[in-house]
Amino acid sequence: MTNLERDPGVVTGVDAPARSAVEVLTPRDVPLGGVRSMTVRRTLPQRRRSLIGAWCFVDHYGPDDVAATGGMRVPGHPHTGLQTVTWLFEGEVEHRDTVGTVSLIRPGEVNLMTSGHGIAHSEYSTPLTSRLHGAQLWIALPDGRRAGQRDFQHYAAPQVVFGGARLRVFLGELVGESSPIRTWSRVVGAEIALDPDASLDLPVDAGFEHGVLVDTGSVRLDGVAGEAAELLFSAAGTDRLHLQAGSDGARLLLIGGEPFGEEIVMWWNFIGRSHEEIAEHRRAWQARVATFEDGSSGDVDDFGAFPVAWDRVLPAPELPTVRLKPRR
């Protein structure tokens, strides 16, 4: 998924230590397109927190009536310096990218795309989809991997039962389950379903920061309450998370990872380390957009070869008038 804001905010820096054991990060609504469009609820990044481990972007959407909103219709757009993670609860989305991938994403399956030095992709809900409901997340690539190869991976995570909860571990390792998906930072990602009033003591890596995105219902994380679409942050240093569902039960996404420890500059769909780097990503993408519009092949090493099925691509917004600087 792309950030479709025409005046995207600048996200910089490394987060300060958490002020309390658990923080509640509330979402803001972002329209994904025009008047007739989906709205996503964005909890990361925000002023209070830019990253959880290497996770740097969390959008939560739906359940949406596709007949009313038109569903997901995101034309070709670029990414640099990151891995995109797509997870669905309902519906079906077709992904196409400049590696040559054509893949359907369905509930219980994860799509992970690695941008390397630059990739572009599109995402459209399929004609069979009547309700769309899911999450899109980004993982910042560490400096040594940002210029690597483009890549795409897909995995159907099996459901397992632990402590009465139902889990699907789609990234990393948790409760003895391991995902084969390759990431370049130590991270974890899992869907967790809890019955009404159920509790779960979840063993986790004490070196990880963790986030719990509440999809449906309500939950308490170590005694701190979170409602649907809120993201609960837990600092590194604990080897167990206590989850307590409300009377309607709860479905959650758990994300986590080692504190990232690198300064980043994130603007629109690009992650870099400096103003100059972001400006160069934008220049290269705009040049690639020009080749699409005039039908020439251009330098396909910049973001790869466009799929023949694409009928349009998204130009980048204008850069802000102020210099983009990492926050120290």
Image: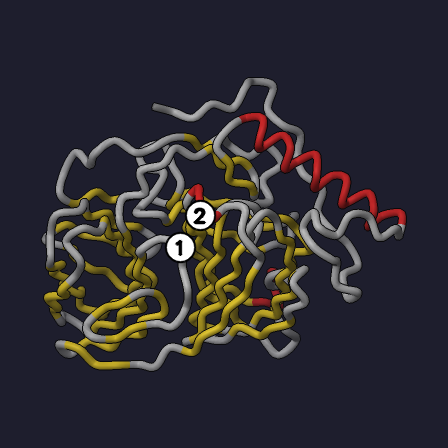
> Residue 152 — which label?
none
Q: Which residue is mark 1?
A: 184
Q: Which residue is mark 2?
A: 141
Q: Is residue 259 left or right of residue 45?
A: left
Residue in front for this viewpoint, 209 or 191: 209
Q: Is residue 263 above or below residue 152?
A: above
Q: Is residue 149 above or below residue 247?
A: above
Q: Earlier in the sequence, mark 1 or mark 2?
A: 2
- Render colour scheme: secondary structure
Q: Amino acid at mark 1?
A: Trp
Residue 168 % position (x, y): 31, 74
Dot 2 surroundings within 10 Å: few (below 14), some, or many (20 or more)? Answer: many
Residue drawn at point x = 21 percent, y = 42 percent? 23
Q: Please state which amino acid type lies under the numbered disc 2.
A: Leu
Above or below 74: residue 317: above
Image quadrant holding the C terminus, namely: top left
Q: Quadrant of residue 97?
A: bottom right
* Res 134 → quadrant: bottom left
Mark 1 and mark 2 in contact? Answer it, CB < 8 Å.
Answer: yes
Would you identify the image quadrant in which residue 288 lies?
top right
List x then y, in percent, for residue 269.
Answer: 56, 43
Whether 35 is drawn above or below 95: the answer is above
Q: CA distance from mark 1 to mark 2?
A: 7 Å
Q: Nearer the viewer, residue 282 or 70?
A: 282
Q: Which x, y percent locates residue 22?
A: 17, 45
On screen, residue 108 versus residue 277, left or right, reads left
The percent position of residue 81, horizontal first and vertical second, equals: 51, 45
Where is the N terminus found, in terms of image quarters?
A: bottom right
As helix, strand or loop, the secondary structure at mark 1 comes to loop
Residue found at x 45% / y 33% = 11
Mark 1, other Cα within 10 Å: few <14 / some 14–19 / many ≥20: some
